[in-house]
Structures are given as C-alpha cells and as structure tokens.
Image: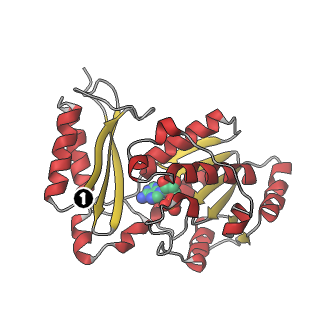
C-alpha cells in the first residue's frame, strides 16, 4: 500500500515542507531524477530510506544538460506514473519544478569542473556536465538534504557531484547506489525505451564486453590491450563506440599496464540513435 505523497513545484513550497522535518531534527534524503522511473531509480529510493527518515525525490528533465542535437524533446515523461511509483516506494515529497523555476529569466551562473569533465562522456557531450553540476548544486541548496543518493550507472557524474560538494562545502553526504540491471545484464536506463527489438538483443553485449575486460584485467592483461579488445568486440557487433576506458575509480585518471589497485572499466556506445553507458569495477588478484 502506498503512503501519501505531496507534490511541490516551487522552491518556496519545497523549503516549507522540509523545514518541518528539519526543525524536528529528522534526517532528510534527496534522490534527484529526470523521471521515467524504473527499478534503478527505485533502488536509490531504498538506499535513501536506509539513510534518512524522510525521502524527497525530484523530477526535472534538465534542458541545460542536453546538447542541441540530443534527445531533450523526446526524453520520456510520465509524471503521473512516476509519482505513483515514488509513493509506493515510500517517498513523502516530490519536487517537480518547471524550467522557469530552476532557470528564471536572467539566470547567469554555471558550475563547471573542467578537469573531471573534459574526457569520457564530457568529450562527446560538451556542456553536459556543466548542466548537471549546476542543476545538482541548485537542488542540493534548494532542498538542503542531509544525504543525497546518486547511481553508479552515471559514474563520471557521481564523481563530479562528490567533487563539487567538497569544493563548495555543501553540507550533504553523497551516497552511491549500485547499478540495477536486466536479467541479461543490460543496465536499466530511461533511454532503453528508444531501442528497437533487434537493438534490445544487442544492447546487453555492452555489459558483457566490459565484464570481459574487467576479467582480463584481473588476470594481468594491460589496460590498453583490454580497452582496445573491448572496443574491437563492440564495433564488431555494430556499436559505434565513444570510448572503452580503464580508469582510477576515485579520480578517473587513465591507467596503463596491468592494474595494481582497483579500477573502473567504463564504456559509452551508440546503438542506432540510442546512446548507452555502463561501467564495472575490477581489481587485481590478491598477491
Ligand atoms: P536519471 O533519471 O537518468 O537522471 O537518473 C537519476 C539517478 O538514477 C542517477 O543518479 C542515476 O545514476 C541513477 N540511475 C539511473 N539508472 C540506474 C540504474 N540502472 N541503476 C542504478 N541507478 C541508476
């Protein structure tokens, strides 16, 4: 049975709602989303509930993080369905602002972390992470949660958010939730709905290939060989590959040679008109 959920659309109403909990000294967790919710998002709600008495979710398809040729217009939207899912998951409050509430006329600020966002997804999507960093900073200041939960699915984004919270002294704990997958390994994504039935058959190969690279690294293969082999396999299956990369899991620094400490195997591909990203952890064998 779902509990009652309140919807607010303005920062003023959001602050009025959370102020009651704050005054009572009750911890608040925020889960930012762009809606079209699936089990991955709901897993973050469950993580949030483990960390705080009250869970707030936000739904905002942030135009600032889409490029001019990207899918902002066709991005799936289902407010009524989303609110029902959030209520069932135990969210008490959902913030669904209009674009003008977040970016009123005259809005002029940008939060930018060039060193973390120049490559990987940032190389293919210029300005994307500025849009993410700016909106997440705003959401954290608007809601002022004790905890905010983000998925490892968007691994580069997660590190960007951790960094901006550190740099700007935003008093919030960032908690990461693991990637939720289909039984065939495909990471859940609101964009999977774009895939044709044939592409659905191919898409799980991304995870398989990243997992194979992770296993090769465990067995002592070098990073360059593992990432080249991954790219080659994906291209052979019809993916257009943005990158397959082996990175330091804390700094995203490129790694070379056999790994000597934990690493992250990261990939981004296009399948038809759909861009898919995924990543898996790996670590050297205990010596
Ligand atoms: P989005 O609505 O795509 O902006 O995602 C909102 C949050 O859900 C982000 O923190 C994502 O990393 C997270 N997320 C998206 N897909 C998954 C997934 N398959 N498993 C876990 N978290 C996810």
Colour scheme employed for the rendering of this structure:
secondary structure
Q: Is residue 284 left or right of residue 238?
A: right
For disc 1, the neighbor class at 10 Å (few under 14, some 14 to 19, many from 20) is some
Ligand 1 within 8 Å of the CB at mark 1:
no
Q: Quadrant of the N terminus?
A: bottom right
Would you say 236 lies left or right of 187 here?
A: left
Query: Front-most of 189 and 218?
Result: 189
In the rendered image, is residue 125 in sight?
yes
Residue for badge 1: 240
Figure check: 179 above or below 247: below
- Residue toward you, 139 or 186: 139
Q: Residue at x 31, y 30 (%)?
A: 255
Secondary structure type for disc 1: strand
Residue displayed at 22% across by 58% down = 205
**Which is nearer the eye, 148 or 228?**
228
Can you give x and y, in whole percent of width and height, for residue 283 in the image? 30, 32
In the image, is residue 175 above or below residue 61? above
Residue at image position (68%, 54%) is 139
Res. 178 in view: no
Name of the residue lying farthest toward the left: 236
Residue 257: percent from the left, percent from the top? 22, 26
Relative placement, left or right, of 109 versus 197 is right
């Amino acid at each position: 049975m779902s509990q009652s959920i309140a919807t607010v659309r303005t920062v003023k109403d959001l602050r009025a709602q959370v102020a009651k909990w704050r005054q009572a000294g009750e911890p608040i967790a925020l889960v930012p989303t762009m809606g079209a919710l699936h089990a991955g998002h709901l897993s973050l709600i469950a993580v949030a509930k483990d960390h705080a008495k009250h869970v707030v979710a936000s739904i905002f398809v942030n135009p600032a993080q889409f490029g001019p040729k990207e899918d902002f217009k066709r991005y799936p939207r289902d407010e009524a369905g989303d609110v029902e899912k959030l209520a069932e998951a135990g969210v008490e409050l959902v913030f669904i602002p209009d674009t003008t509430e977040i970016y009123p006329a005259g809005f002029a600020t940008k939060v930018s972390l060039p060193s973390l966002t120049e490559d990987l997804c940032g190389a293919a999507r210029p300005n994307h992470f500025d849009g993410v960093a700016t909106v997440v900073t705003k959401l954290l200041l608007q809601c002022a949660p004790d905890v905010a939960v983000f998925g490892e699915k968007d691994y580069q984004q997660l590190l960007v958010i951790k960094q901006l919270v550190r740099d700007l002294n935003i008093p919030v704990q960032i908690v990461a939730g693991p990637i939720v997958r289909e039984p065939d390994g495909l990471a859940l994504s609101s964009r999977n709905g774009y895939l044709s039935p044939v592409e659905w058959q191919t898409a799980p190969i991304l995870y398989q290939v990243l997992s194979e690279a992770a296993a090769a690294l465990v067995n002592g293969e070098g990073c360059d060989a593992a990432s080249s082999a991954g790219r080659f396999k994906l291209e052979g299956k019809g993916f257009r590959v943005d990158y397959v990369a082996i990175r330091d899991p804390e700094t995203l620094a490129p790694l070379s040679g056999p790994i000597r400490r934990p690493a992250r195997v990261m990939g981004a591909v296009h399948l038809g008109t759909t861009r898919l990203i995924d990543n898996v952890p790996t670590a050297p064998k205990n010596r």
